[in-house]
Amino acid sequence: MVADYQAGETVAIKLNFNDSIAGGGTSGYGDDDAYVDALPQVANALIRGLLVFGMAEEDIWLYDA
């Protein structure tokens, strides 16, 4: 939990970019398929919340396997 966070501890957030660009092209979010696109606003909101709770920016890692 963030309440137990101590400086130097890290948190890793696994993002999912599987449908961030439709069909592997370059059209971005303008597609009309039924899939949910990977939106940066979700990750930004999560990071902003962690920072508000006092987590250090360098202790937040984002990745996609």
Image (cartoon, helix red, strand yellow):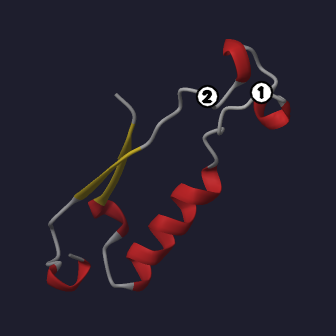
Is residue 6 shown left or right of residue 11?
left
* Alpha carbons under labels 1 and 2: distance apart: 10 Å
Relative to 51, say whether 43 is above or below.
Answer: above
Relative to 53, say whether 39 is above or below.
Answer: above
Q: Residues within 10 Å of mark 1 (few under 14, many from 20)?
A: few
- Identify the mark at residue 19; answer none if there is no mark: 2
- Name the residue located 43 percent from the left edge and 84 percent from the top edge: 52
- Residue extending farthest top: 24
Q: Amino acid at mark 1?
A: Asp
Relative to 49, say whether 17 is above or below.
Answer: above
Q: Quadrant of the C terminus?
A: top left
Q: Quadrant of residue 58?
A: bottom left
- Name the residue located 37 percent from the left edge and 67 percent from the top edge: 57
- Name the residue located 56 percent from the left edge and 61 percent from the top edge: 44
Identify the element where label 2 is drawn: loop
Q: Quadrant of the N terminus?
A: bottom left
Q: Residues within 10 Å of mark 2 (few under 14, many from 20)?
A: some
Give the labeled residue for mark 1.
33
